[in-house]
Amino acid sequence: MKGVIKTTGIIIGLAALIAAGVASLNRDSQTSAEIFRVSPVEKGDLRVTITATGTVEPEEVIDVGAQVAGRIVSFGEDRQGKPIDYGSVVKAGDVLARIDDALYVSDVDHAKASLAQARANLERAQADLGQLEAKLEQARNDWKRAQQLGPSDALSQSSYDAYKAGFETAKANLAVGQATIAQNRGAVLQAVAALARAQRNLGYTTIVSPVDGTIIDRRVNIGQTVVASLNAPSLFLIAKDLRHMQVWVAVNEADIASIHPGQQVTFTVDAHPGRAFYGKVGKIRLNASMTQNVVTYTVEVLTDNSDLVLLPYLTANVQFEVASKSNVLTVPTGALRWTPAQDQIDPSVAGNLETVTALARADVSDARPLRTTGGAKSATLWVQSGNSVRPVFVYAGLSDGVRTEIEGDGINEGMQVVIGSNADERESETRQGPSNPFTPQIRRGRARGASPH
């Protein structure tokens, strides 16, 4: 019995030793075979963009209003013979609506009568003036004869004075007649102006389109009374030309310095998923707006709409192209941010890493510069060398946040660069803690019996 127990103990001990050895071997194998995550250097295109949201707008919208008050009695007809309504295509001069003109016809008739009366008064005054001129001529002749005779036996003093007074009265009457004519001429001009105003108001009862375009809004109904006051009431909105549209984009103040007229723009609308539309920046409005302490500027983007698929007031998701490069070497941006632990660096460079870095960066600075116009910075990539990594020094250029342009000696398409390691994952898992759903959860809060205050 003792022999069996002894044999069993030996077997258990050997099994424990074997298990410990295997575990140790696995640990040594994992340590020596550090797993690095790599990604290839790729050649491709880069685009740096600014993203914003805007609204599709017609290039020009005309607000057609009423200049006289009255009741809407009818609408005009479009080119298809249908009553003017939303979406109607109209030409300049087409009738849009008519206002009840009974009152304005009466005003025209009254103005015509007033003009006729004024002209009659003028003609009568002109006729009276002729009589006054004849009387003045007679009085002048009588006064001349009286002056030749003078007060004498042939002409008494009273008669002499009467001829003189008659001449003066005739002159005064002629002046009054001339003034009456001038007054009547003024009355005629006033009557002409009143008639023109009445006729113009009568014409205003017919609302016509001032331009070729499309009705995008009708704001009045038949039977509705419009009241013209200081501001003409709006009846219709007409988009002048829907073949050319704008996108009004709200751009954050932090990005506005990167926007300039002529800049290329790409945008999409939810109404046409999967389709990209193109345009260019027209102008930047300087009247910034502030919403919840966020300052934005409105940027007008011009775009072609020859196929009329873009409708007014669609929401547009806009991308302004800030910079672009074609056919350049790129790496994941994370590769430029990754830094190895000290024990992951190749021993041949780990001890004098600072010296190697300085020499390598000096070599990089002497190499040909990036084909970009500034903004290039020296950076470090890491490539795997056995179970460790060694640095490769490059210039980093244009970046879209996901991939970054690089250039340097020894950098070729397809070259594998390190973007992380399994040590990073283990550290992340350690920080996150156990994910076992059966692990007891620690509840934080007041101790039992503690006062809430």
Image (cartoon, helix red, strand yellow):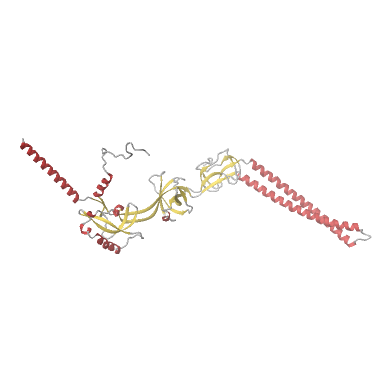
Residue 274 placement (x, y as % from top left):
38, 45
Q: Which residue lies furthest to the top in this view?
A: 1
Q: Can residue 384 be seen in this view?
A: no
Residue 442 placement (x, y as % from top left):
29, 40
Report whether 174 appears left or right of 219: right
- In front: 82, or 397? 397
Q: Is residue 315 visible?
A: yes
- In front: 199, or 322? 322
Residue at screen point 12% across, 42% down: 15
- In front: 232, or 452? 452
Location of residue 134 by image quarter:
bottom right
* The C terminus, quarter of image: top left
Residue at screen point 11% across, 40% down: 12
Q: Residue furthest bottom?
A: 366
Location of residue 351 by image quarter:
bottom left
Residue 147 placement (x, y as % from top left):
88, 61
* The N terminus, quarter of image: top left
Residue 86 placement (x, y as % from top left):
51, 42
Residue at screen point 85% across, 56% down: 166
- In front: 239, or 337? 337
* Number of marks drawn: 0
Report whether 166 appears left or right of 28: right
Location of residue 328 by image quarter:
bottom left
